[in-house]
Amino acid sequence: MTERTDYIITPWEIEIHVQDLQPSNIDDIGTKRWLEFHKKLMLLNQQSVLEISTLREEAVKEWFISLKKMPVLIHEVIQINVWKEKLFPLLIEINDEPTNTFLLHSVFYHEVIACSLLENILFHSDTAEAVDDYALDLIDYAVTNVTNLLFKGKEESEDEFEDTNSCLAELLRKRKEIEFDISMKCVSILRYMAEFTDSLSLCALSRMLSTHDVPYLLTELIEKQPWKKLGEDGNKMVYNGKWETVNETDQDRMCRVEGQVWIGLREILLNPKCAPYYEITEFRMSKLVKLQKYLHETILDQISPLIELKRWLCQLSVMSQPPNAQKPIIVEMLPEVRSSILAKYHRKWKKIAKLQSKSLFNNDIEHIKSMAQVLSEAYDLDKLESIEPRRCFACKEIASNRCSKCKEAWYCGRECQVKDWTRHKDVCDKIIKNKEAYGIKD
C-alpha cells in the first residue's frame, strides 16, 4: 500500500497560491493561463479536504480569510454558471460534437472545486465577515441551485442519455452529476448562512427570508429528500458526497445533507432576529406544520436541539391565525457579480464562443497533451489517496491494491480483482490507450 503523504501542498505553497488568486475573466476560460488558475484551486481544495479529514489546523481556511479571498470563490462559481448558460450552448451550436471532453469537463469541474472550498470554509463562524458584501451574491447562487434541484427538469428521465455513447452525451451525463453535487453543497452553504444570521447584514437577511423564502426551500427538501434514491438492484442509496448503498443497520440514520437542512431550519425559525423578516402567512404555516411528522424519535435522538424546533412547530399549529411581525424598513441592495459579468460581455457571447472553440474543441493531440500536463500535478494519485481511502471495485471494502496496468481500479485483494476482471478488462484497455494518446504518465 502506498505510504500516505502529510500534505497535498506545503504550508508556504498554500499562502502563495491563495495570495495569487484573482477573479478570472470569462473570455480566458480554456486557455493555459486559466488552467494554471484552475490547478491552484484544485490543489487548495484537495489540501482543505485533507486538513478537515485529518482534524488538523485548517491553513487553507485561515489564508482565505486573512487575505480576504472569499470573494474570488464566489465570483468563480457565478462566472461558470453564466458560462454554462451563455457560452456552452453556443459552443455546441458552432462545433457540434466534441471529439474529446477533457477541457470542457475541466470547466464544469471548476465550479465544483470553488463551491467545495466555499462549503469547507463557511463551516467556520468567523467566515461570515469574510464574505462581506458578497453575501447577497452567494445567497442568490445557492438558492438558484437548490431551486433547480427541487423544481427543474422533472420531466428528464434517469436514462435520458443512455441511447448514445457519443462524447457529447457523456459530457452531458457528467454535467448532470456535477450539478447535482453542486446543489448538495449549496444546501450546506444555505445552512451555514442561516447560522450566520446574527452576523449578516440586514439586506442579506431580508434577501434570504423575504425575497427567497429559504425556510420554504428547506421544507421542500425535507419533503422530497433528493439525497435518497433506489439503486439499480433495488437497494436504498443515500448521497454523502457520492451515492452509497445503505446498510440494513443504518436504515434510520440521517445522512449529512438531511442534517444540514434540519439545522438550517432550526437556526432560521428560532432566531428572534429573523422574525421581523419572515412573516408567517397562512401558506407558510401550512408548509411548516407538515414538518412535525418528520420529527420522530429517531431524528430527535440524532440531533437533540431539534426538540426545540418541534416544540415551536407544535405551538405554531395550534395558533388561531398566523402571527404578523412588524416589518422593518430597510434599503435593499442587489447582488452585483452576475449582473456585472452579463453587462461586461453583453453582445460579445458569439465572439467569445468562437475564440474558445479554438482551445476547448481543439483536436490537436500536442495541444491536448500540453493542457493535460498543466493539471498532471493536481492528479497525483499517491497524494489523493491520503484524502480518502479507496474502495474495492468489487466488494466496496477498503482497498490497498490497484490494477498494475491502468492504475485506476482498486481492490482489497487478488480474489476480488480476479472476480472483477471480466468487467474491468475493456475499461482497462481504454484507459491505457487514452493515457498514451494524451501523454499522461502514472
Image: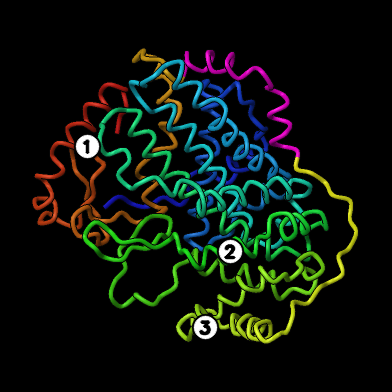
Q: Is residue 104 magenta?
A: no
The stretch of residues the image draws in magenta is: 336-359
Question: How packed is label 3: few (under 14 Cα within 10 Å), some, or many (20 or more)?
Answer: some
Q: Is residue 196 left or right of residue 111?
A: right
> Quadrant of residue 373 in the image?
top left
Of the residues under marks 2 and 1, which one precedes in the sequence? 2
Q: Is residue 341 magenta?
A: yes
Badge 1 is on which residue?
Answer: 406
Q: Which numbered circle lies on residue 218?
A: 2
Q: Whole-percent x and y of residue 236? A: 31, 66
Of the residues under marks 1 and 3, which one precedes in the sequence? 3
- Between 305 and 381, which is closer to the camera in this rendering? 305
Q: Main secondary structure of the magenta part?
A: helix
Q: Which numbered circle lies on residue 300?
A: 3
The image shows residue 134, relative to residue 265, as above or below, that is above
Query: Which three-letter amino acid code belongs to the residue tagged 1?
Result: Cys
Labels 2 and 1 touching (C-beta < 8 A): no
Labels 1 and 3 touching (C-beta < 8 A): no
